[in-house]
Image (tube, coloured by chain):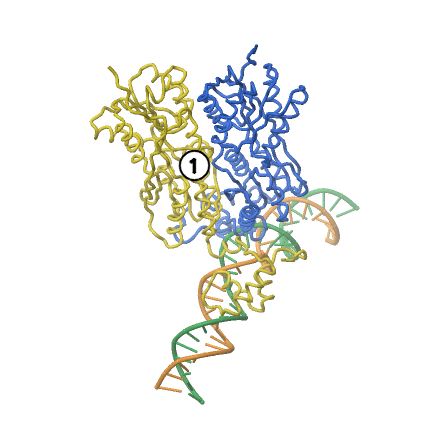
Chain colours: A yellow, B blue, C orange, D green
Amino acid sequence: MGNNNDRRLPRLEDVAARAKVSHQTVSRVINNHPNVSKATRERVEAAIAELGYRRNTAARSLVTRRTQTIGVLASELGQYGPANTLLGVQQAAREAGYFVSIAAIKGAGPEVISDAVRHLTDQGADGLIVIVPHDGTLQALERLNLDVPVIVVGGAGEGRLSGAMVDQKLGARLAVAHLIRLGHQRIGHVSGPLGWIDGQGRVDGWREELAEAGLSDDLLVEGDWSAGSGYRIGQQLAEQQGATAVFVSNDQMALGLLRAFGEKGVRVPEDVSLVGFDDQPESEYFMPPLTTVRQDFEELGKRCMDLMRAQIEDGAAGGTLVVNPELVVRASTAPRPRLP
Amino acid sequence: MGNNNDRRLPRLEDVAARAKVSHQTVSRVINNHPNVSKATRERVEAAIAELGYRRNTAARSLVTRRTQTIGVLASELGQYGPANTLLGVQQAAREAGYFVSIAAIKGAGPEVISDAVRHLTDQGADGLIVIVPHDGTLQALERLNLDVPVIVVGGAGEGRLSGAMVDQKLGARLAVAHLIRLGHQRIGHVSGPLGWIDGQGRVDGWREELAEAGLSDDLLVEGDWSAGSGYRIGQQLAEQQGATAVFVSNDQMALGLLRAFGEKGVRVPEDVSLVGFDDQPESEYFMPPLTTVRQDFEELGKRCMDLMRAQIEDGAAGGTLVVNPELVVRASTAPRPRLP
DNA sequence: TGCGCTACCGTTAGCGCTAACAGAATGGCG
DNA sequence: CGCCATTCTGTTAGCGCTAACGGTAGCGCA
């Protein structure tokens, strides 16, 4: 095994000496340059293995002006979506030989974002992936005038910013179409905060699907993504009894609604059908299990990283990447109750 | 504003030229060396601001042999605890001028861990924070013989590894003591998988508290942290009817139990009291709201970073850092039903 | 005046790597 | 046999920064 108790880590030159070549040849082997004979390549690789040599990334970055690092700017990391997107990005990055540096933020003010971006660019990030689903994010980023590729998750690419998103509108339409198929005609929507990118898309999808079926879209209430807001809204809805089905913009709020309905004696799905959004792992174990729209965040993260590499390595143009969501039907939806 | 359309980013020398000093003096200003006169310091700072100079971290790392980067190795990032620990680490790191590079893994085999560790050390991480709550983690890490400080979250420090943990045993005792105070005498426990560090601590705490009260600790079932396993276990427990109270090792499994109990007609808390662990945001909105043990993961992450800095910058010895948990009483616990 | 000490600032070298060029060896072909 | 193209390898320079040392000016004190 690599024995270098004597000093510090081995360098290119140490490997070179051992393999009886120049350090430059070792560099060529490492970087897979073509013009190295098979014999010397093998000798060099053996020396690398014996010494346990690992390339010094700082030195490499200094000369190549690339850090092989992707900066990820994320808020709400404690939540299912962002966390899994990060996971996908990281896995794809590691496979491709990139490092992932993160800046986690709370809130999404322009100041907070620019601080975090500066932190990442200070490190020399080759590209930025932004997982901050607020509406103002795009503008805040555009103002910064960055000179590395930027991908905004959950946003459509505009100008120099690329986007990557699950098709929220489609997801919402799947949910609403399902309810319509079950015979519902009064279908409410509990949205996320207006001004959040994803939330707006879901509102639009809900509207469009209702419009096509000739149904009214007047039953809209705004929540704040939290289970608590779902609970409060659920209490109101239980008393109004306006809708026979509610499409809720995420699973956590749906959980809040379930509790409020339970307390008020409104049965799900007998009295009201409920559809969520996200399909986080717990949703299958709500009471009743929640019909919801699955988003494959990990896949989204991976494809994000692919798009990023294309831009960094081949200078490809940006664009917007779309992943399709999927409806998962469980016990919280049922045919519309026949009323007198 | 900084106008450098001409070429690439400004270097120390550009700043030096503008401020009519040597590049070394600029370096001194940046690094807060004492022997710089006030006048020149201000001149240099002005030049830095005008040019928008930012230090090149690669060059700095090359000579200092420090990357100012902390590697975070994390599994289960989609879960509440790890995600928030990461958040805390990152915030403390950024404040202290450190970068955080992450390696997210699935599973926790020695191979997987050593790959991820290699990835982080390849980047030259100055220290490692490991958020992988499996039992084998410690051994896998010890075998790697790293020459940077390592802090294992959820583990006690041993030898060259430091630890940082919420006091699981204490948390469990708080939960069980609460149930005992309510008059319960048959108190079951749904544990996490044996071999998970945190889970074992909770089992021990449960045992000890029962023992001190002279109660039996025979009602132990092993789950796998998921809501699904909680559901299946809940179905069994509902039929056995052995316990009047159950301490569940995390909130997600408790959610599964709630659903199973609901389906079987076992009322919570009238028939059985339930206590969870973690206090994730949703737990307040379970039906009924869940009594649980709160862990302040963000605080844990921050203190982790403090400990790390002490080791990196002052060569301090490692140690084990403990954060206290807190009991949060909600509606899922009630006095023991009086039976005939 | 001379000596030493302190405060300040500049010069030099080198961290480990890759790009660019220069040189040596080989092979094909007239 | 000579010439050029091709393949392989070595040499040199420099990425931007900090450590280490050297030099100068100013001051106090004998």
Q: Residue B305 at x, y = what percent?
A: 58, 37
Q: Which of B49 and A127 is in front in this view?
A: A127
> Which amino acid type corresponds to the residue marked 1 in the rendered image?
Pro
Determine the chain carrying the residue at label 1: A
Label 1 environment density (alpha carbons within 10 Å; few <14, some 14–19, many ≥20): many
Mark 1 sits on what residue?
A82
Above/below status of A65 relative to A204 = below
Q: Residue C7 at x, y = what percent?
A: 64, 44
Q: What element carries label 1?
A: helix
Q: Which of A119 and B212 is in front in this view?
A: B212
Task: For the C terminus of chain B, give its image quadrant.
Answer: top right
Above/below status of A19 relative to B265 = below
Q: Residue B278 at x, y = what percent?
A: 53, 28
Task: Tell me the quarter of the picture where residue A86 sits.
Answer: top left
Q: Residue at the location (40% across, 39% down)?
A: A297
Task: Tell me the quarter of the picture where residue B294 sits.
Answer: top right
